[in-house]
Image (tube, rainbow, N blue to C red):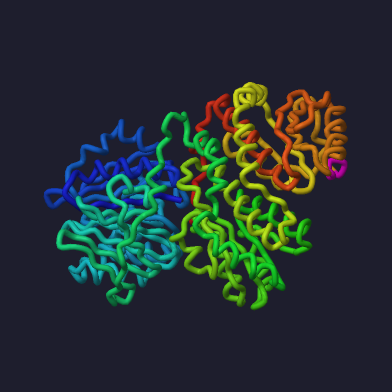
Amino acid sequence: MCSIIGYLGDISATKILVSGLKRMEYRGYDSVGVATFADSQIRVKKGVGKVEQVNTKSNLHTLPGNIGIGHTRWATHGGVNEANAHPHLSSPGEIAIVHNGIIDNYKELKEILQTRKYFFKSETDSEIIANLLQYHFDATQDVKRSMIKTVNELKGDYSFVAVFSDGTLAAARFHEPLIVGVGKNGYFISSDVLGFIEHTDEAIYPDNGEIVIINFDGIELFDFTGSPVMHQVTKISKEFADAYKGDYAHFTLKEIWEQPLSILKAGENTRQAIESFADTVRVAKQLYITGSGTSYNAALVAKHLFLKYGKKKIEAIISSEARFYPDYFDNQSILIALSQSGESADVIEAVKIAKNNGADIFSIVNTMTSSLTQVSSISVGLNCGPEIGVAATKSFTSQLSVIYKIADLVCENQVGFDIQKTSSTMSKVLESSSKIQKISQVLKHASDIYIIGRGIHYPIALEAALKLKELTYIHAEGLPGGELKHGPLALMDSNSFVIVINPNDSTYTDTLTSAREIKARGAKVIGISDIVSDVYDHWIEIPTINESAYPFVEIVPIQLLAYYAALENQTDPDYPRNLAKSVTVK
């Protein structure tokens, strides 16, 4: 939802903070700010916009000091304006904080603090933390005691970093990510390793309910009761250092092109976990799978594979809906949770509900140090490296890759997934990107786009609609091809564009018939198929491949179509408006 970073060391803090925030901008980009400590004073600069914009306007990098904190915001409480941007200062200006998450009891705490003569300048829940820390520090004159008293009054899921007027950095983690970097030139505290990967590959991962205090004497970690805790310094995977666009215009385009390789790497370091995963799933009496957004679409593909090739029933649940059906789960249930970040609030809540009812938790996740992996019996890593583009691309096909590998084991090789052939076929699709770019021009003034698919192609139609919505801001809707006569045909006219996912498999003839029905209503048809047809106004050719593997091949041209259509509409494909990469609040 937001990115937070802190630094204490030997070099200019703002140099660290601004570069770290740029690398984490995928987590939040409504506003940005930094605060530093120097000459016994905390100074703050912040503004609305992306990191580069605000830095150019306000010269964030000119703040003095070797101690500081920074933040990029994705608005939850209060509008997008400078007052609501982080960091937030306490009333006397002696403490500044940056925060990720939600404080559920902020209204009650605000009323109490106001009666104690602490005032507020923003509409955010975050500012509560600054004044609550100040209140306890005024009473104790002790950073550690102030932190313990504060976190024991806060309700919600959060992580925050504070800088005190004595030059101390302090941070706390409760169900939101927080990582400590240990470098030669100082200490870093961040919501993401990308915040400090340029400077060190050594990190400490605090657990939930832990506090970190850093000063020039060193680092101290303890739990919310004040008891000391010990953590080993671990090496960060080198793949996370590779978060640069290189010669690509956008991260999204780079990540689309990385997919032939990333599906090969998916689950690469967790083969034993994949086998254990499959062995347990094979005999499971009650099997569920959950995810949000793109991950839910991957879950629907899994449902199709298990049912068609293994006659294994698996119920797909949208994570945000799980709370309404808590009785789904019992001690004979397995819940498979899909998440790129492993921190998505809706997924974590669904997992908690299932676990509290006795279910076993398996997960497929890209971040193997995440909250989700900590509560899972078995976790399989996507191993696809950082995905900076907010709209999921390579993480989706990496999820599919892991799902197919598990399904092939569970279904005794009936899926017939040839990953090497699938990878090379995806590469062939990418080679036709210039043709897809030309077709994207016809979508520039579209008001409605519909995508139809049957069978395993229906989840891909849903994912295609999601990508188009996210990147182009055009209304897009995925539809089951067989349902046109039950309502959607009423929407088809000469102003409509319809993308028909129609590879040469068992769904081909029926889907072609649907395309003709659409064409008869005057809609413009874009066909995605390995067979040309006169019904298509525009044809995106895909290579022929084993029937089960078509989802990998057909999603790539639609990702490219959405990317190039975004450029036509002059939207930023890396950072769609109103969206954040890791949705850590409900």
When asked about the image quadrant of residue 274, the answer is bottom right
- Work out whether 128 lies above or below 79: below
Residue 443 pos. (x, y %): 66, 26
Image x and y of residue 161, in percent = 31, 57
Q: Residue at x 58, y 69 (%)?
A: 361
Q: In the orientation shown, which residue stands out farthest toward the left? A: 39
Majority secondary structure of the magenta segment? helix
Q: Give residue 430's quadrant in the image.
A: top right
- The residue at the point 69 percent across, 71 percent down is 284
List x then y, in percent, for residue 192: 39, 52
- Rendered position, 129 above or below 383: below
Indicate yes or no whether the magenta region holds residue 139: no
Q: Is residue 512 visible?
A: yes
> Left or right: where does residue 204 sit relative to residue 477?
left
**Relative height, residue 312 to residue 440 (above, below):** below
Q: Is residue 30 left or right of residue 264?
A: left
Q: Magenta stretch?
A: 482-486
Q: Is residue 468 visible?
A: no
How many numbered marks, from 0 up?
Answer: 0
Tell me: residue 355, above or below residue 201. below
> Where on the picture, by quarter, is residue 283?
bottom right
Task: Please provide percent x and percent y for residue 217.
Answer: 15, 62
Q: Nearer the viewer, residue 406 or 585?
A: 406
For the residue pair 38 and 271, the one nearer the viewer reads as: 271
Q: Nearer the viewer, residue 87 or 302?
A: 302
